[in-house]
Image (spheres, rainbow, N blue to C red):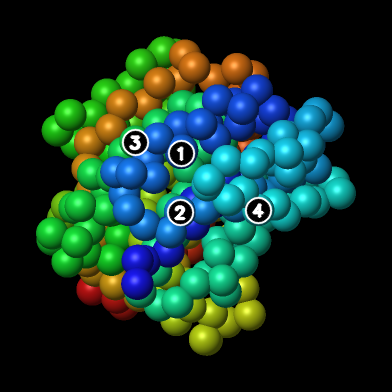
Amino acid sequence: MARKLITVLPSYNEEIALGRLFPQFEDLVPLIGEDLSILVVDDGSEDQTAQISNAWSGSVVVNSIIFPQNRGYGTALEQGVIDAARRLGPDDLIATMDADDTHDPKYLVSMMEHLDKEQLDVVIASRYADGGAEEGVSWDRKILSHGACWFYKRVFDLPNVSDYSCGYRLFRASLIQRSLETRDSLGLESGFQASGELLLRLREQTHAIGEVGFELHYERKPTRSKMQKMKTVMGTLRFLKEVRRTVRSLA
């Protein structure tokens, strides 16, 4: 029986991007050979995000969770990951991606191959690994992302990881299932620093984490960024200070 793979897409006003993304997943079906589906978490969108998701009728099944009001990226990410883990068996896979068409689904193929070949539990799509790149990213966002990765590296210190803040990841469902055995939730904050917090939850369950290179194409983003930069920076620094002791205990 083929493994199942659910890709979680936290989404806020992404009607244009989702219309581009869904057909790209269709192209993956013959390449992956897995039971592939998408879980859109509509975070109180004011456009046609929910309608686009519900109307999709391709071979890749699209399911939706709809929040009546915007609750923040981290809340949508957590709800999507937990819901996916509850739908899957321990050997199945969860992917997380940005829903704004800056992350190409084609990298799921190399991520799955790397996970199986190297017997990993988590694979990160990295802008900084061999073959990785950033296109269409402004200088201030580059400084922000590189700075965040520098701070994450000092705290997490994963030997095979260079990109800690990218939300494009693939991991075994069993990691989330085990994490929820000892807590009621993943405890992610509502802001964009939740991507790092999710990495910590995964790190608590395994050291088998690696990455593959990927090209971030920010110029394909059809809407303005929803990230509040200073709020994200302060939230990230506060989070890293709080978890330093936790990560050391996992060494």
Q: In this view, does 154 lie to the left or right of 24?
A: left
Give the secondary structure at mark 1.
helix
Query: How far apart, in angstroms, are the residues tagged by discs 4 and 1?
Result: 14 Å
Residue at position x 55%, y 64% in the image: 84
Q: Where does residue 188 sit, x and y in percent of width and height?
A: 59, 60
Q: Which mark is residue 36?
A: 2
Residue bearing the label numbered 4:
63
Q: Earlier in the sequence, mark 3 or mark 4?
A: 4
Q: Quadrant of residue 204 in the image?
A: bottom left
Give the secondary structure at mark 2.
strand
Query: How far apart, in angstroms, are the residues tagged by discs 3 and 4?
Result: 20 Å
Numbered circles on residues, count: 4
Residue bearing the label numbered 3:
106
Q: Residue 25 carries which label?
A: 1
For the question of whether residue 64 can be seen, the reply is: yes
Q: Is residue 187 above or below residue 73?
A: below
Q: Where does residue 123 sit, x and y in percent of width and height?
A: 28, 53
Give the secondary structure at mark 3.
loop
For the question of whether residue 193 can be seen, the reply is: no
Tag 4 and tag 2, C-beta contact below 8 Å:
no
Badge 2 crowding class, 10 Å Cα cut-off, few under 14, some 14 to 19, many 20 or more, is: many
Give the secondary structure at mark 4.
strand
